[in-house]
Amino acid sequence: MSLLQVQGLELSFGGRTVVHGVDFEIKAGEKLALVGESGSGKTVTALSLLGLAQGAQAQGHAWFASGARKFDLLRLPARQLQAIRGQDIAMIFQEPMTALNPVFTIGEQIAEVLQLKIGLTPAECAQAAIELIADTGIDDPARRAKAYPHQLSGGQRQRAMIAMALACRPQLLLADEPTTALDVTVRKQILDLLTDLQKKYGMAVLLITHDLNLVRQFADRVAVMESGRIVEQGAVADLFAAPQHAYTRRLMASKPVRNVLEHPARAEVALVARGIRVAYPVPRPGLRGWFSHGEFVAVSQLELELPCGQTLGVVGESGSGKSTLALAALGLLKFEGAMSLFGQSWGAGVHADRALRKDVQVVFQDPFSSLSPRMTVEEIVGEGLLVHEPGLSAAQRCQRVKKTLDEVGLDEGQFPGLLARYPHQFSGGQRQRIAIARALIVQPRLLVLDEPTSALDVTMAQQILQLLQGLQRERGLAYLLITHDVAVVRAMAHHVLVMQGGKMMERGPVAQVFGQPQHEYTRILLAAAE
């Protein structure tokens, strides 16, 4: 008998239907993956099952079997649905930093679920929370239970959210992109953890993702969703071996493709770093902390060289020092050692660096948070010109903005009123194109790319990589690419630098390092990415 049977599900917002007649079922103990691009309706379908899709008008049925009873989740009164949430059906959200409450410890948040749903005493809740944290593989669970979300790494926060979701031993777990923001090794750890816990508790899992490699490793069955409709579903092995629908085949073909100049003609060196060391002050325990601080070394004795027209990929786990290196390269973080930008000293101070500031720009990981929601596209893209080319008239700035947006594939013909629109009116891939235009408009020679595709689905990521490859060929740009995605490095980089614990483990040409890795850590990264 099916644990969950969804029949003819339709979801509308303000009279506009976004999910059309969706049918699928999940049996007890089964793992079903719901796959599709951003905007395909995956997440809103899952949220509607728990009544969390605010403002949605739902039609159809979602039959859920709990013991001898069977409920239509779409027809339950709010009080009954509230009783099912967290107890019979639980959810892991995509971004734990925003889903967890920042003012309560991890232990308190897990204990709250146990107290409300099961009615345990405070002492029993505290002990059960520690045991749940231990189940998810977090070291020193008693200490971690007293930690706040910001005091944990991304992988630890995701494990804490899994512990909270599993507190009441649910029959069905909804996992919404549970590994998207994690590096490859932590991603594999979370995937293995979910597999182990699913077997241990015998629960069913609905995995929402755009990562086909994740689906292949985890799921029993897969349903492919396009524009609010399920276009194909079946056993994972069968669907991957012989996809029937054109959209499924397109998703599977959306892999990063290498299309770069292997030996650029320009020999000028964009960035040189020698003996770079970055340390953060940390408090000392006890009385010593009143008089002095300790230090945490984020980057230690790092050396690199990046020629114009080439890409240096920097890979490593969370906490390896990648982002710290990026901030130092942008001149936003003090460092020890020597760094030069196009032959001139870099990092000497705000006034000394001002002349070089326009030559190095950045594209951040999440375009939604890096673009101001209160500024129009014209204001966002043109802001750099106000600083670096203040002599331009308003009409000249507008013309430059239009030209740059056209270079990244956005124009008024495709998006009427483009310049007056706001970031929330665009998709994730389109927002990233706006972020790239903002960086390009001052005509930089070096771009720092901080996980430029990790927040995008596979087809959007492929488009952004093609755009970046084309811009590099046309402009001779140098890229410092910060990423945990080995496939992106293979497609984009000429050289790669592998980091762990703030230190360089290995560096060299991509083909050499990935083809014949010399360091054990590099081999672990490559194995986790397969």
Image: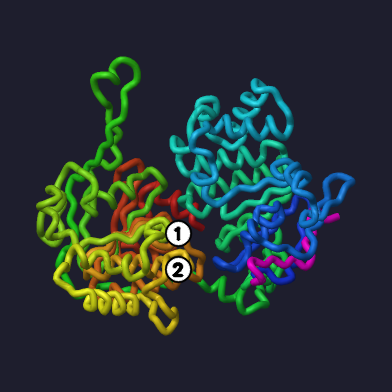
Task: Tell me, yes or no, if residue 486 can be seen here.
Answer: no
Residue 274 vs residue 407: left or right?
left
Q: Secondary structure at mark 2?
A: helix
Q: Residue at x 38, y 50 (%)?
A: 316
Residue furthest out toward the bottom: 413
Q: Which residue is mark 2?
A: 429
Give the dominant element type of the magenta stretch: helix, strand or loop: strand
Toward which corner of the image does residue 477 lie, by quadrant? Answer: bottom left
Q: Residue at x 58, y 41 (%)?
A: 161
Q: Which residue is mark 1?
A: 454
Pick whichever, 280 or 250, lies toward us: 280
**265 inside magenta stretch:** no
Residue 126 vs residue 316: left or right?
right
Q: Secondary structure at mark 1?
A: loop
Q: Residue at x 63, y 32 (%)?
A: 112
Q: Residues within 10 Å of mark 2 (few under 14, many from 20)?
A: many
* Residue 38 image position (x, y, % from top left): 55, 66
**10 inside magenta stretch:** yes
* Residue 478 image position (x, y, % from top left): 25, 66
Q: Which residues are magenta?
A: 1-17
Give, as a three-letter code, the residue at label 1. Ser
State the mark number for residue 242: none
Toward which corner of the image does residue 476 lie, by quadrant? Answer: bottom left
Q: Is residue 206 above or below residue 130?
A: below
Give, as a three-letter code, the residue at label 2. Gly
